[in-house]
Image (cartoon, rainbow, N blue to C red):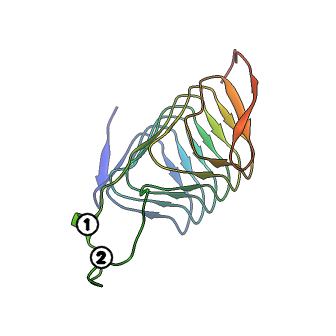
Amino acid sequence: MEKKNINNVKLGKDVKIFDFVNLYGCSIDDYSKVGTFVEIQKNASIGKNCKISTHTFICEGVHIEDNVFIGHNVTFINDKYPRSTNVDGSMQTDSDWKVVETWVKKGASIGSSSTILCGLTVGENAIVGAGSVVTRDVPPNTIVAGVPAKPLKKKVFTEN
């Protein structure tokens, strides 16, 4: 399995990237697809066989495992207390804040227009309903939805 590194982006085998995508310092593994108008920032990782739909924002510190579906217009957050300036009024730099990592486990699906706050895990085979705001961990094999997202059903999934 040959890996390519173009402009500090590590691409696996047969990765499909559509037009108008902004990628830098990230990795995308084999057979994954990235839709139009997606941004994937440095130190983010996408596993194998993932589908990242259009207009999605995957920020630094987001780790998406294999076989994950990300719907249209999904936004990930990586800072619990975002600010543009420091107390003294100076613009913040990378050294003024800490990335808070987020994990999306194997086989999970995140519905369109969902927002995923930082520091949590979306469990294996979990489903996040469209338009949800995920504020805490989603257990494996669980369907959540709403604002904030709450469990609707726990189900054992037999297929990805």
Q: Going 71% across and 37% down the picture, which residue do you hit?
A: 150
Which x, y percent locates residue 40?
Answer: 45, 57
Q: Going 34% across and 54% down the picture, which residue do you hit?
A: 99
Q: Nearer the viewer, residue 47 or 141?
A: 141
| Quadrant of residue 88 within the rendered picture | bottom left
Which x, y percent locates residue 130?
Answer: 75, 48
Which x, y percent locates residue 114?
Answer: 66, 52
At mark 2, the secondary structure is loop
Residue 66 versus residue 53 in the image, above or below: above
At mark 1, the secondary structure is helix
Which x, y percent locates residue 81?
Answer: 42, 62
**Which residue bears the numbered disc 2?**
86
Discs 2/1, front:
2
Screen quadrant of the C terminus: top right
Which amino acid type corresponds to the residue marked 2 in the rendered image? Asn
Q: Residue furthest right?
A: 152
Q: Nearer the viewer, residue 40 or 92?
A: 92
Residue 67 versus residue 18 in the image, above or below: above
Q: Are marks 2 and 1 in contact (CB under 8 Å)?
A: yes
Q: Going 43% across and 55% down the picture, which residue do you hit?
A: 78
Q: Residue furthest left?
A: 95
Q: Nearer the viewer, residue 46 or 140?
A: 140
Q: Which of the two labelled residues, at mark 2 and mark 1, occupies the earlier sequence position?
A: 2
Can you tell which mark lies on residue 75?
Answer: none
Q: Residue furthest front?
A: 87
Residue 22 as seen in the image, left or right of residue 6: right
Can you tell which mark lies on residue 96?
Answer: 1
Residue 146 as seen in the image, left or right of residue 13: right
Which amino acid type corresponds to the residue marked 1 in the rendered image? Asp
Screen quadrant of the N terminus: top left
The local crowd at label 2, few if under 14, some if 14 to 19, many if 20 or more residues have their Cα within 10 Å, is few
User: Marks 2/1: CA distance?
Assistant: 8 Å
